[in-house]
Amino acid sequence: MQYKGIVFDLDGVICHTDKYHYMAWKQIADEIGVYFDEAINDRLRGVSRMESLEIILEKYKGELTAEEKQKLSEKKNNIYRNLLCQMSPKDVSEEVAETLNELKRRNIRIAIGSSSKNACFILRKIGLLEIFDATSDGNNISRSKPDPEVFLKAAEYLKLNAGECLVVEDARSGIDAAAAGGFPCAGLGDAAAYEKTNYPLHRFSEVLSVIENRNR
Protein backbone atom coordinates (compact mmCIF):
# COMPACT_ATOMS: atom_id res chain seq x y z
CA MET A 1 0.00 0.00 0.00
CA GLN A 2 1.35 3.42 -0.93
CA TYR A 3 1.76 6.14 1.68
CA LYS A 4 -0.54 9.01 0.81
CA GLY A 5 -0.07 10.97 4.01
CA ILE A 6 2.32 11.62 6.88
CA VAL A 7 1.38 12.47 10.46
CA PHE A 8 4.18 14.26 12.29
CA ASP A 9 4.60 14.64 16.00
CA LEU A 10 5.33 18.30 16.73
CA ASP A 11 7.77 18.72 19.59
CA GLY A 12 11.13 17.09 18.85
CA VAL A 13 10.22 16.45 15.21
CA ILE A 14 9.05 19.70 13.57
CA CYS A 15 10.50 21.99 16.24
CA HIS A 16 11.96 21.77 19.73
CA THR A 17 10.27 23.18 22.83
CA ASP A 18 11.75 20.80 25.42
CA LYS A 19 13.68 23.60 27.09
CA TYR A 20 10.50 25.62 27.60
CA HIS A 21 8.66 22.62 29.08
CA TYR A 22 11.58 22.02 31.40
CA MET A 23 11.73 25.65 32.55
CA ALA A 24 7.98 25.77 33.22
CA TRP A 25 7.82 22.45 35.10
CA LYS A 26 10.97 23.34 37.04
CA GLN A 27 9.32 26.51 38.30
CA ILE A 28 6.25 24.54 39.43
CA ALA A 29 8.36 21.83 41.07
CA ASP A 30 10.44 24.42 42.93
CA GLU A 31 7.31 26.13 44.22
CA ILE A 32 5.97 22.90 45.76
CA GLY A 33 9.37 21.71 46.96
CA VAL A 34 9.76 18.73 44.62
CA TYR A 35 13.07 17.67 43.08
CA PHE A 36 13.02 17.94 39.29
CA ASP A 37 15.81 17.46 36.76
CA GLU A 38 16.42 16.75 33.07
CA ALA A 39 16.07 12.98 33.55
CA ILE A 40 12.57 13.39 35.02
CA ASN A 41 11.75 15.86 32.26
CA ASP A 42 12.65 13.22 29.67
CA ARG A 43 9.91 10.99 31.10
CA LEU A 44 7.35 13.66 30.21
CA ARG A 45 7.97 13.53 26.45
CA GLY A 46 4.78 12.69 24.55
CA VAL A 47 2.78 12.65 27.80
CA SER A 48 -0.25 14.85 28.54
CA ARG A 49 0.02 17.77 30.93
CA MET A 50 -1.92 16.15 33.77
CA GLU A 51 -0.04 12.88 33.39
CA SER A 52 3.22 14.85 33.44
CA LEU A 53 2.16 16.49 36.69
CA GLU A 54 1.45 13.08 38.23
CA ILE A 55 4.99 11.97 37.34
CA ILE A 56 6.42 15.06 39.01
CA LEU A 57 4.25 14.50 42.09
CA GLU A 58 5.76 11.04 42.60
CA LYS A 59 8.32 12.81 44.78
CA TYR A 60 5.81 15.08 46.53
CA LYS A 61 5.55 14.58 50.30
CA GLY A 62 1.85 15.10 50.69
CA GLU A 63 -1.47 15.00 48.87
CA LEU A 64 -3.11 17.46 46.54
CA THR A 65 -6.77 17.71 45.67
CA ALA A 66 -7.93 17.44 42.07
CA GLU A 67 -8.61 21.17 42.12
CA GLU A 68 -5.09 21.95 43.35
CA LYS A 69 -3.61 19.75 40.64
CA GLN A 70 -5.69 21.49 38.02
CA LYS A 71 -4.47 24.90 39.21
CA LEU A 72 -0.83 23.75 39.07
CA SER A 73 -1.39 22.38 35.58
CA GLU A 74 -2.92 25.65 34.40
CA LYS A 75 -0.13 27.67 36.01
CA LYS A 76 2.49 25.54 34.25
CA ASN A 77 0.75 26.08 30.94
CA ASN A 78 0.61 29.84 31.43
CA ILE A 79 4.35 29.91 32.17
CA TYR A 80 5.01 27.68 29.16
CA ARG A 81 2.90 29.75 26.76
CA ASN A 82 4.67 32.93 27.86
CA LEU A 83 7.98 31.25 27.09
CA LEU A 84 6.66 30.08 23.72
CA CYS A 85 6.08 33.71 22.73
CA GLN A 86 9.83 33.81 22.10
CA MET A 87 9.43 31.34 19.22
CA SER A 88 9.52 32.41 15.57
CA PRO A 89 10.07 30.91 12.10
CA LYS A 90 13.78 30.86 13.01
CA ASP A 91 12.96 27.86 15.23
CA VAL A 92 12.27 25.76 12.13
CA SER A 93 15.37 24.32 10.47
CA GLU A 94 15.92 24.81 6.77
CA GLU A 95 15.87 21.02 6.38
CA VAL A 96 12.42 20.70 7.95
CA ALA A 97 10.97 23.57 5.90
CA GLU A 98 12.38 22.24 2.62
CA THR A 99 11.21 18.68 3.34
CA LEU A 100 7.66 19.78 4.14
CA ASN A 101 7.52 21.85 0.96
CA GLU A 102 8.79 18.91 -1.09
CA LEU A 103 6.14 16.63 0.40
CA LYS A 104 3.47 19.14 -0.59
CA ARG A 105 4.95 19.29 -4.08
CA ARG A 106 4.61 15.49 -4.29
CA ASN A 107 0.95 15.74 -3.23
CA ILE A 108 1.56 13.93 0.05
CA ARG A 109 -0.99 15.04 2.64
CA ILE A 110 0.59 16.10 5.92
CA ALA A 111 -0.82 16.50 9.42
CA ILE A 112 0.29 17.12 12.98
CA GLY A 113 -0.46 14.50 15.64
CA SER A 114 0.45 15.97 19.02
CA SER A 115 -0.81 15.50 22.57
CA SER A 116 -0.15 19.19 23.23
CA LYS A 117 -3.06 21.60 23.52
CA ASN A 118 -0.67 24.32 22.36
CA ALA A 119 0.08 22.76 18.97
CA CYS A 120 -1.71 25.37 16.85
CA PHE A 121 -0.27 28.21 18.94
CA ILE A 122 3.25 26.85 18.34
CA LEU A 123 2.64 26.26 14.63
CA ARG A 124 1.38 29.82 14.28
CA LYS A 125 4.47 31.21 16.06
CA ILE A 126 6.87 29.28 13.83
CA GLY A 127 4.94 30.09 10.64
CA LEU A 128 3.85 26.55 9.73
CA LEU A 129 0.17 26.49 10.63
CA GLU A 130 -1.01 26.88 7.02
CA ILE A 131 1.27 24.26 5.45
CA PHE A 132 -0.37 21.33 7.26
CA ASP A 133 -3.56 19.86 5.86
CA ALA A 134 -4.83 18.94 9.35
CA THR A 135 -3.94 19.22 13.01
CA SER A 136 -4.91 16.65 15.63
CA ASP A 137 -3.88 17.69 19.12
CA GLY A 138 -4.75 17.69 22.79
CA ASN A 139 -7.87 19.74 22.13
CA ASN A 140 -9.65 17.04 20.13
CA ILE A 141 -8.64 13.88 22.00
CA SER A 142 -9.57 12.36 25.35
CA ARG A 143 -6.66 9.90 25.57
CA SER A 144 -2.97 10.76 25.23
CA LYS A 145 -0.18 8.69 23.70
CA PRO A 146 0.52 5.76 23.86
CA ASP A 147 -3.19 5.56 23.01
CA PRO A 148 -3.49 5.91 19.20
CA GLU A 149 -6.44 8.32 19.27
CA VAL A 150 -4.46 11.40 18.21
CA PHE A 151 -3.12 9.63 15.11
CA LEU A 152 -6.44 8.01 14.24
CA LYS A 153 -8.07 11.45 14.35
CA ALA A 154 -5.31 12.89 12.15
CA ALA A 155 -5.83 10.13 9.56
CA GLU A 156 -9.57 10.76 9.71
CA TYR A 157 -9.02 14.47 9.05
CA LEU A 158 -6.79 13.57 6.08
CA LYS A 159 -9.50 11.15 4.85
CA LEU A 160 -6.98 8.28 4.85
CA ASN A 161 -6.77 4.98 6.68
CA ALA A 162 -3.97 4.09 9.08
CA GLY A 163 -2.08 1.95 6.56
CA GLU A 164 -1.87 4.88 4.14
CA CYS A 165 -0.31 7.23 6.72
CA LEU A 166 3.27 7.18 7.92
CA VAL A 167 3.73 8.47 11.46
CA VAL A 168 6.99 10.28 12.30
CA GLU A 169 7.88 10.35 16.00
CA ASP A 170 10.83 10.96 18.30
CA ALA A 171 9.37 9.41 21.47
CA ARG A 172 8.79 5.74 22.24
CA SER A 173 5.31 6.49 23.57
CA GLY A 174 4.52 7.98 20.17
CA ILE A 175 5.83 4.91 18.37
CA ASP A 176 3.71 2.75 20.71
CA ALA A 177 0.68 4.87 19.81
CA ALA A 178 1.34 4.52 16.09
CA ALA A 179 1.81 0.76 16.34
CA ALA A 180 -1.37 0.42 18.42
CA GLY A 181 -3.33 2.25 15.71
CA GLY A 182 -1.95 0.16 12.86
CA PHE A 183 0.26 2.93 11.45
CA PRO A 184 3.69 2.34 9.91
CA CYS A 185 6.12 4.53 11.81
CA ALA A 186 9.45 6.28 11.35
CA GLY A 187 11.57 7.18 14.35
CA LEU A 188 13.93 10.08 14.97
CA GLY A 189 16.32 10.46 17.92
CA ASP A 190 15.64 7.96 20.70
CA ALA A 191 12.78 6.43 18.72
CA ALA A 192 15.10 5.46 15.84
CA ALA A 193 16.52 2.55 17.85
CA TYR A 194 13.16 1.38 19.20
CA GLU A 195 12.20 -2.15 18.16
CA LYS A 196 8.69 -1.10 17.09
CA THR A 197 10.03 1.53 14.69
CA ASN A 198 9.66 0.49 11.04
CA TYR A 199 11.95 3.14 9.58
CA PRO A 200 14.87 4.48 11.66
CA LEU A 201 15.71 8.03 10.55
CA HIS A 202 19.02 9.80 11.13
CA ARG A 203 17.80 13.05 9.58
CA PHE A 204 14.36 14.56 9.10
CA SER A 205 14.78 14.74 5.33
CA GLU A 206 15.14 10.94 5.11
CA VAL A 207 11.36 10.73 5.29
CA LEU A 208 11.42 11.63 1.59
CA SER A 209 13.37 8.45 0.83
CA VAL A 210 10.88 6.37 2.83
CA ILE A 211 8.00 7.75 0.78
CA GLU A 212 9.89 7.40 -2.50
CA ASN A 213 10.94 3.80 -1.87
CA ARG A 214 7.47 2.79 -0.70
CA ASN A 215 5.58 4.49 -3.52
CA ARG A 216 7.78 3.63 -6.50
Image (cartoon, rainbow, N blue to C red):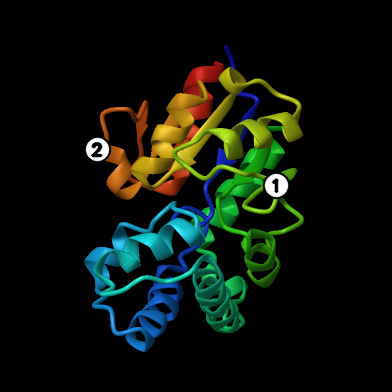
Q: Give the vertical position of 21 relative to 54 (above or below).
A: below
Q: In which image quadrant can residue 165 be found?
A: top right
Numbered badge on residue 212:
none
Left or right: 177, with 74 as reference point: left
Q: Name which residue type carries label 2.
A: Ala
Sequence order check, earlier mark of 1 and 2: 1
Residue appearing at x 61%, y 48% in the figure: 100
Q: Name which residue type carries label 1.
A: Asn
Q: What element does badge 2 sit on?
A: helix
Query: Where residue 88 sits: x, y (%)?
Result: 61, 76
Q: In which image quadrant can residue 109 be found?
A: top right
Q: Mark 2 — residue?
A: 193
Q: How many numbered marks, from 0 up?
A: 2
Query: Where residue 81 sits: x, y (%)?
Result: 59, 77
The front one of 143 and 107 is 143
Q: On the rendered image, what quadrant is the C terminus found in?
A: top right
Query: Where residue 23 sits: x, y (%)?
Result: 40, 80
Residue appearing at x 40%, y 76% in the figure: 25
- Near mark 1 (Cα within 10 A), the count class, few <14, some 14-19 or many ≥20, is some
Q: On the rendered image, what quadrant is the N terminus found in?
A: top right
Q: What element does badge 1 sit on?
A: loop
Q: Mark 1 — residue?
A: 140
Query: Where residue 95 sits: x, y (%)?
Result: 50, 55
Q: Residue furthest top?
A: 1
